[in-house]
Amino acid sequence: MKIFIVGLGPGNIDLLSKRAHDLIFESNIKKIFRTKRHEIINKLTVNKIDFTSMDYLYESSENFEEVYSKITNYVIESVKQYDEIVYAVPGSPFVTEETPNMIIDEARLNNIDIEIIPSVSFIDSIICSLKKDPTRNFYITDFFNLDIRSEERFSRNAETDLVCR
């Protein structure tokens, strides 16, 4: 059994890695997308690529933790049924994403192989658009983890860029 955790990139299909593209356009593998709210979906629909979206869980769950737990369980049960699956997330699998690590943890407990297929993250696109070196006065955080009152980086004299999802 194997789960391919695939990053969909920031939206432009040209920024999708070749391996991610090959897996997503492979017709004989079950595909699960965390969300269909991504620019690549239109291209997949035109090409009649079949996939299952987890969007319905966001509407039927009490909180994100419940959504992520249900997604993790669905992915693990699906790989047991189909032997190999693709689980795709927007951007890169480890940038502002919770489910890949949860799936990896459960896969280890169930002796399921994992292969990570990265693509360009939205951070790469933003850095290029801003023409900024991310190692100099650049702070990136998830909006849900932000507490500006406790962040010394946000002094009035600092020239710091902030990017949130």
Image (cartoon, rainbow, N blue to C red):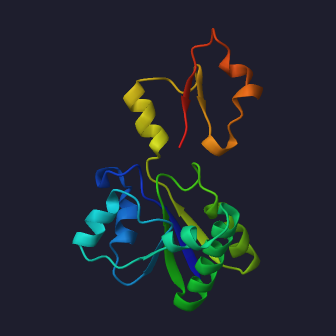
Can you name the residue that lies furthest to the left here? 46
Q: What residue is at 72 percent from the left and 81 percent from the top?
A: 110
Can you name the residue that lies furthest to the bottom here? 81
Residue 52 picture location, percent across and down? 44, 77
Evaluate whether residue 142 shows in this view.
no
Q: What residue is at 54 percent from the left and 27 percent from the top?
A: 134
Q: How many marks?
A: 0
Note whether 27 is above or below 150 in the view shown.
below
Q: Nearer the viewer, residue 151 or 125?
A: 151
Quarter of the rendering occupied by the N terminus: bottom right
Q: Nearer the viewer, residue 130 or 85?
A: 130
In-image side of 164 versus 50 (left or right):
right
Evaluate whether residue 133 shows in this view.
yes
Q: Quadrant of residue 162?
A: top right
Residue 94 picture location, percent across and down? 59, 52
Q: What residue is at 40 percent from the left and 63 percent from the top?
A: 19
In-image side of 148 versus 50 (left or right):
right
Q: What residue is at 68 percent from the left and 74 percent from the top?
A: 107
Note whether 90 is above or below 162 in the view shown.
below
